[in-house]
Amino acid sequence: MESTQVIKALAALAQESRLAIFRLLVQSGPQGLTVGKIAEHLDISSATLSFHLKELTNAGLLSSRQEGRFVIYSASFAAMNDLLGFLTANCCGGNPCTPVVACVTVENPRAT
């Protein structure tokens, strides 16, 4: 992935509604969601949603397809993986990185 594409993708995700849209579509999987379902889940007006979908699509993070009279958007998992790969390409000086993750439990809700 080229730096210019990375910058475009990160810029598109650097907005609360667009980040929420992208995360929702990642959760929905490759089948994606209709524009109406996205609007319903996130309580975003159609005009605003249209703008955000266009920005995410132009950044290469979403794809759309027509099914009858519905437009269905889905996350581009290849673009997401390319972006993550770019961001972690030289992680830890070439040594395997193992992030430390603490589990939050009912007994220890403040674990970090």
Image (cartoon, rainbow, N blue to C red):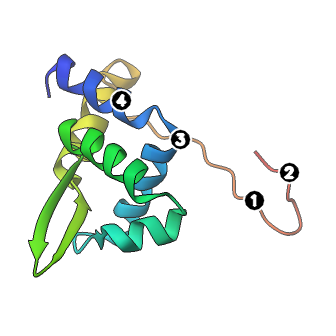
Are the residues flagged by discs 1 and 4 in contact, CB closer than 8 Å? no
**Nearer the viewer's eye, disc 1 or disc 4?**
4
- CA separation, marks 2 and 3? 26 Å
The residue at the point 29 percent across, 72 percent down is 34
Q: Which quadrant is home to the C terminus?
A: top right
Which residue type carries mark 1?
Answer: Val
Q: Position of residue 33 (x, y in %)?
A: 31, 72
**Nearer the viewer's eye, disc 2 or disc 3?**
3
The residue at the point 89 percent across, 67 percent down is 107
Instruction: Kindly identify which numbered label has been placed on residue 110.
Output: 2
Q: First in sequence: mark 1 or mark 2?
A: 1
Residue position for label 1: 104
- Count residues near mark 2 (Cα–Cα under 10 Å), then give few for <14, some for 14-19, many for 20+: few
- CA separation, marks 3 and 4? 12 Å
Res. 85 visible in picture: yes
- Count residues near mark 4 (Cα–Cα under 10 Å), then give few for <14, some for 14-19, many for 20+: some
The residue at the point 24 percent across, 62 percent down is 74
Which residue type carries mark 2?
Answer: Arg
- CA separation, marks 1 and 4? 29 Å
Front-most of residues 74 and 46: 46
Secondary structure found at label 4: helix
Which residue type carries mark 3?
Answer: Glu
- Count residues near mark 1 (Cα–Cα under 10 Å), then give few for <14, some for 14-19, many for 20+: few
Residue position for label 4: 10
Front-most of residues 46 and 56: 46
Instruction: Kindly identify which numbered label has been placed on residue 16.
Output: 3
Q: First in sequence: mark 1 or mark 4?
A: 4
Q: Position of residue 77 (x, y in %)?
A: 22, 54
